[in-house]
Image (cartoon, grey):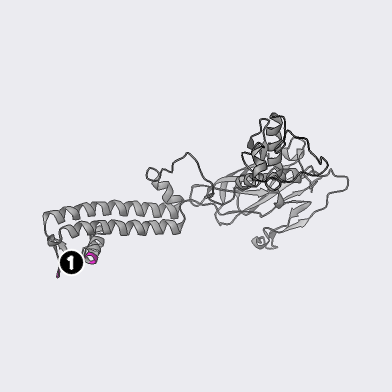
Amino acid sequence: MKRIWRRLNTQQASAHGKTWGQTDEPDDNPAEPAEPEDEKLGADDRKGKKARSISTKEAVRRFRKHALDEKDHSDVVRVGLKDALWSDLYHHALTANWFSFTLWAVVFYIAVNLFFALLYAMVPDQVSAPHPPSLPDLFFFSVQTLSTVGYGVMAPSGPVANTIVSLEVLMGMMINALATGAVFARIARPRARIIFSNKAVISDENGVPALCIRIANCRRSVILSLDVEVALSRLTVTHDGHLERQFEPLLLVQAHVPVLRFAFVLAHVITEASPLHKHTIRELDAEEGEIIVTVTGTDEAMGQTVFSRTSYAFDRVMNNHRFVDIVHSHPGGGISVDYSRFHDIETHAPKAGATKEPVHPA
């Protein structure tokens, strides 16, 4: 990231005819390496220099890597975009974690019942009870009315109280319907139990270097018509000095899998046309490169579309390795899949005379 930011500073400064931190005065020690401006300059010295719009440390903090894994990216601040909570309440109810969902449901439930209890407290003489009702009594009377339980100990006895009860019963039916739908949607939402290998490997078992990623179906039901897309993501600096995230597709040997029963290895052959052929692992790591994998298919048991995704930074890409076998056949005709070794890899030396992988730690 620092390397990218230095390139960005160099390009922007070149447009102004000087580098960042450079003054119009000659340098007394040109051979001495320049110190960081924030450490070398005092407050008085900074006044005579063109201040940076952002420091390198701040740039690294702002543009740090956000891998496209299962994170919810709650640390990303969206400036100039309002959160449409009430107009998009259903989406918030589905995407919130269970703790937040339950907490807000309880808070809302208490607030509604407390609101109606205060309304009943305005006409206490129209709520019949064995004794003068207190605020807690009216609160629990609201709970009984909202849920249409009605134990019969307390009951409305006036027009105002009956009107409030009618409104609360109507609201209670709506709240119960919405809450039931939200809980059911959260539980019944289709999820693909697809696991990805925790590392990607580059091997050349057939004399040709290939990037390989293993996926597996953890359910007994098969996944039909599986489509896989793999892309290389890089954070680059454009000619006009702007940071830009680029996505380059990595073509697979087999991007469509008709049936995924157990495990399958995705392979991208690194030819001269491959985006991985032009860069070393060190270059891709400096550009915060990631390999992004998205999977979409249809669950046979549910008949619904399921999807999953993951990403690999290049510190998780292993050269000259291959995945160990996890599917074994028995003499009686049965098949066993050893998921305990799903992530295991082993070294795999290139064949004699084989071309060295274009992606290498140079």
Quadrant housing residue 335: bottom right
Asked if residue 128 shows in the view, the reply is yes
The amino acid at mark 1 is Pro
Q: How many marks?
A: 1
Residue 140 within the magenta-colored segment of the rendering: no
Asked if residue 232 shows in the view, the reply is no
Residue at coordinates 19% horizontally, 60% vertically from top-left? 121
SS state under label 1: loop
Above or below residue 83? Residue 154 is: below
Above or below residue 147? Residue 37 is: above
* 190 displayed left or right of 158: right
The percent coordinates of residue 203 (x first, y second) are: 77, 49
Q: Which residues are magenta?
A: 130-136
* Residue most extreme to the bottom: 130
Magenta stretch: dominant SS?
loop
Quadrant housing residue 30: top right
The percent coordinates of residue 33 (x first, y second) are: 79, 44
The percent coordinates of residue 350 (x first, y second) are: 83, 49
Q: Which residue is mark 1?
A: 133
Above or below residue 336? Residue 14 is: above
